Image (cartoon, helix red, strand yellow):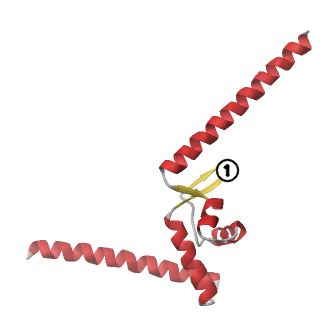
Amino acid sequence: MLAHLQSGRNDARALESRCAMVNGTQALVLWRTANSLLTLQDLAEAAALHPKRVEKFLDFGLIEPLAKTRSGPLFSASSVERLRRIVRLRRDLGVNMAGIAVILDMRERILNLQAELGRVRGRLDLLT
């Protein structure tokens, strides 16, 4: 009889644990959706790449997750376009991984400088 009661308690704990996992998973999915975040698998599919290839780019630092969860990294939707750029540089232009990192960094710097230039021009227009 005692063994039966203990077994029942263990079953109840297991069920409670499974429910918590399901609720946690559902909450994570809702949070991901609300914040437009993609899993590595989602990102690979959106960029038409194999997940292992995306992992390779991640390991090399060419893409960075916005968040990390127990189930894996989460990426912004803009990571899809970045991956497409990476693939174009690699496949179409034959640029190696280090070269891709430099090109993407320089591109980001140029975009930031252009945005700053636009802000400065806006301030100058206010003065004239």
Q: Is residue 83 above or below residue 33?
A: below
Q: Amino acid at mark 1?
A: Ser
Q: Which residue is mark 1?
A: 71
**Element at label 1:** loop
In this view, the residue farthest toward the left is 128
Q: Looking at the image, which residue is at 57% across and 73% down?
A: 83
Image quarter where the C terminus lies is bottom left
**Within 10 Å of the Cα at label 1, are there few (<14), some (14-19), or many (20+) other Cα atoms?**
few
Is residue 107 or residue 83 the one in the foreground? Answer: 83
Q: Quadrant of residue 4?
A: top right
Q: Quadrant of residue 119?
A: bottom left
Q: Looking at the image, which residue is at 50% across and 55% down?
A: 36
Q: Looking at the image, which residue is at 77% across and 28% down?
A: 14
Q: Tell me if 21 is positioned left or right of 111 in this view.
A: right
| Spot occupied by residue 81 in the image (x, y as percentages of width and height) | 51, 72
| Spot occupied by residue 77 in the image (x, y as percentages of width and height) | 51, 62
| Spot occupied by residue 126 in the image (x, y as percentages of width and height) | 12, 71
Q: Looking at the image, which residue is at 58% across and 46% down?
A: 29
Q: Quadrant of residue 6?
A: top right
Image quarter where the N terminus lies is top right
